[in-house]
Amino acid sequence: MKTKPMDIQAVVILIMIGLGAGVLSGLIGIGGGIIIVPALVYFLGYTQHQAQGTSLGVLTFPVVILAFLAYYKDSLSSGAPIEFKVIFLIAIAFVAGAFLGGHMAIRIDQQVLKKIFAVILLYTAIKML
């Protein structure tokens, strides 16, 4: 599969998306779905499937390790440590869920998937407010 070359504007946009998602991930624990996916769709014209796959690819690498270490260090000093057994259990279930969800998503029409994504973000935003 041949990929198109990136111009400087695309490189700058990608770096800004990465920085924004990284800062928000470290600050409040969000980034992939809420920042990267919409940014790739609206700023770079990615399909919903491409954007979601790219976001998952970014999260595959240990991009959050430094933020986790900051939280872990703070949790030890505050007397409310992060429990690795909780991380392990959620991670195992997350891997299984991501595998199933990925297979489901590629079978859903792009426009339907966008609407599902938007409804979940909207519902989450309303509940958080």
Image (cartoon, rainbow, N blue to C red):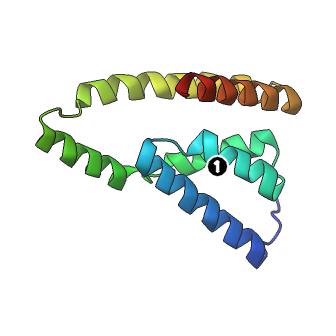
Q: Nearer the viewer, residue 46 or 74?
A: 74
Instruction: Identify the residue shown where x is 56% and y is 51%.
Output: 58
The residue nearer to you, when weighing 122 against 114, is 122
In the visual, does 58 lie left or right of 85?
Answer: right
| Picture quadrant of residue 111 | top right
Lateral position of residue 41 relative to residue 122, left or right: right
In the shown orientation, is residue 56 left or right of residue 91?
A: right
The answer to whether residue 56 shows anywhere in this view is no
Pick the front one: 78 or 14:
78
Instruction: Establish if 28 lies above or below 90.
Output: below
Q: Which quadrant: the N terminus?
A: bottom right
Q: Residue 73 at what x, y percent from top left?
A: 19, 48
Q: Is residue 18 above or below residue 103?
A: below
Residue plotted at (56% across, 28% down) = 129
Q: Residue at x 69, y 41 (%)?
A: 52
Q: Position of residue 48 (x, y in %)?
A: 78, 40
Q: Give the structural element (helix, strand or loop) at label 1.
A: helix
Q: Is residue 84 visible?
A: yes
In the picture, measured across the screen, residue 105 lies left or right of residue 128, that is right
Asked which quadrant contains residue 119, the reply is top right
The answer to whether 1 is drawn above or below residue 127 in the figure is below
Residue 38 image point, x, y percent: 72, 45
According to the image, label 1 marks what residue? 36
What amino acid is labelled 1 in the image? Ile
Residue shown at the point (35%, 51%) measured from the top left: 67
Q: Where residue 122 appears, x then y in whole percent?
A: 68, 28
For label 1, count other residues whose C-alpha is less than 10 Å away and answer few (under 14), some (14-19) or many (20+).
Answer: many
Q: Is 42 or 122 nearer to us in this picture?
A: 122
Q: Quadrant of residue 87?
A: top left
